[in-house]
Amino acid sequence: MIEIIEVKNRRQYRAFFRFPFTLYRNCPQWVPPITKEEEDVFDPKKNKVFNHAMARLFLATKNGKTVGRIAAMINWVEVEELKKTKVRFGWYDTIDDIEVSKKLIEAVEGIAIAEGMTYIEGPMGFSNMDKAGLLVKGYEHMNTMITWYHHPYQKEHLEQLGLVKQSEWIEFKIDIYDAKDAPEKVKKFAQVIKKRYELKTLDFKSTADVEPRVDEMFDLLNQTYNKLQSFVPIQQHQIEHYKTKYLPYVHPDFIKCVVDENDEMIGFTITMPSFTAALKKINGKIFPFGLYHLWRAQRKNNRAAFYLIGIKESYQNKGVTAIIFQEIQDMFNRRGITAVETNPELEENKAIQALWKNYNHELHKRRRTYRKEVRF
C-alpha cells in the first residue's frame, strides 16, 4: 500500500533529502547535491524566500519504505503581482511505479485546491534562480550542480497522468578555441564596441571585490529576463541568500563585468569551474574532505559552466556580449579550460542561444516543466 506522508519531523526531513541517494545509487550520471545546501533551501531561517512563499514536503512510502518524494511551493509574488495562480512542484523523485507518481501529484493538487490555485507546474523551485525542468533528453550525460537528473520513466509517468508540456529548456556543450584559433572577427568586434560606447572591463582579485557589484548584477538579470514566460522578479532578500549560497563557489577570475564611462555596470557573466567530478566524489557531504575537492575543482579544471549572463536593457543587441566573450575566452585559455556547458536556457530565448554561434557547440540536453489544470 502506498502512503503519502507530509514531512513534519526531523526523521522525515532527513528521509526526504536522503531518498535520491538510494534511488540513484547505481546511476553513474547522477551527480549528488550537497545535502546541507538542499536542506537550507527549505529552512525559513536561512532562505528568505519564505518571506513571500510557502512550501510543503511529501514522502511516498510503500510497505514502510520510502519510494518517492515531492515538494509543493507557492511564490506569492508570482501569484499576486504576475497573476499566475499556480502551485510549483519540485524535488520530484520516484521509483518506477506510476501509482507512486500519481499519489505524489495528487498531494500537490491537494495544496492547489486548498489554496485556491488553478494549476500546478514543475519540476521547478521557488524562482528563476532555482533548479528547473525534468530531464527529457541527455540521460547519458551527468547533471551539473545547478540541475537535476531524472530517470526516463519519470517523463512517462507525468505524461500518463495528464500533465502537458509548459516550458522547455535546452543546454549546450561548447568547445573553447585555443588562443591561436579564436575567431579574429570576435576580437576585433569586441574592440570596436568598447571604443564606440566608451566601455571597459573589470577584473576581480577576490570575492570581497565582487560583493559590492552583486546587487547590480541581479538588477541586470531582472532587465535581461523580465519578458520570458517563467520570469519572477528577484527580491532583495533572495539576492542575499544567493550571495551566501553561490559566491563561495565562484573564483573571481570567472566573473567578468563591463562598465560605462561612469563606472555603471552594463553587462556581466558568471561562469564557474565544473564541480561535477568533485560533487561525485564527496557524495553530498562537505566534511571531512568535501571542501578540499571543491577547492581543487576551482583551481585545477579543464571544464567550466556558464551560469548567468545579464545585459542592461539599453545596451542589448549592441554587441556587449562580444566584449564579455573575449574576456572569458582569454581567461579560459590561461586556465587551460577546453570545454564549457551552459546553464539551461528557455527554448524561446533565441538571443542567448545566438551567443554560441561563433563556437563549435552541441545541444545535448533538454528539460521540461509540465502543467496540469486543477479541478475543484
Image (tube, helix red, strand yellow):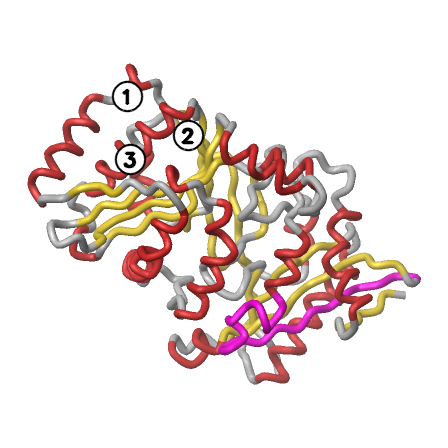
Which is nearer the eye, 162 or 203?
203
Which residue type carries mark 3?
A: Phe
* The label number, if any, that marks residue 174 in the structure image: 2
* The label number, if any, that marks residue 182 in the structure image: 1
Q: Which residues are magenta?
A: 42-63
C-alpha span from label 3 to label 1: 11 Å
Q: Secondary structure at mark 1?
A: loop
**Contact check, label 2 and label 1, Cβ < 8 Å:** no
Which residue type carries mark 1?
A: Ala
Question: Quick check: 210 above or below 229?
Answer: above
Spot occupied by residue 276 in the image (x, y as percentages of width and height): 59, 37
Q: Which residue is mark 3?
A: 325
Q: Secondary structure at mark 3?
A: helix
- Few, some or many residues within 10 Å of mark 1 (<14, 14–19, 20+): some
What residue is shown at x 58% (from left), y 39% (from top)?
294
C-alpha span from label 3 to label 2: 13 Å
The quadrant of the image that shows the C terminus is: bottom right
- Which of the two discs, 3 and 1, labels the residue nearer the N terminus? 1
* The label number, if any, that marks residue 198 in the structure image: none
Image position of 200 (left or right of 124):
left
Image position of 53 (left or right of 207):
right
- Which of the two discs, 3 and 2, labels the residue nearer the N terminus? 2
The quadrant of the image that shows the N terminus is: bottom right
Spot occupied by residue 323 in the image (x, y as percentages of width and height): 22, 37
Which residue type carries mark 2?
A: Ile
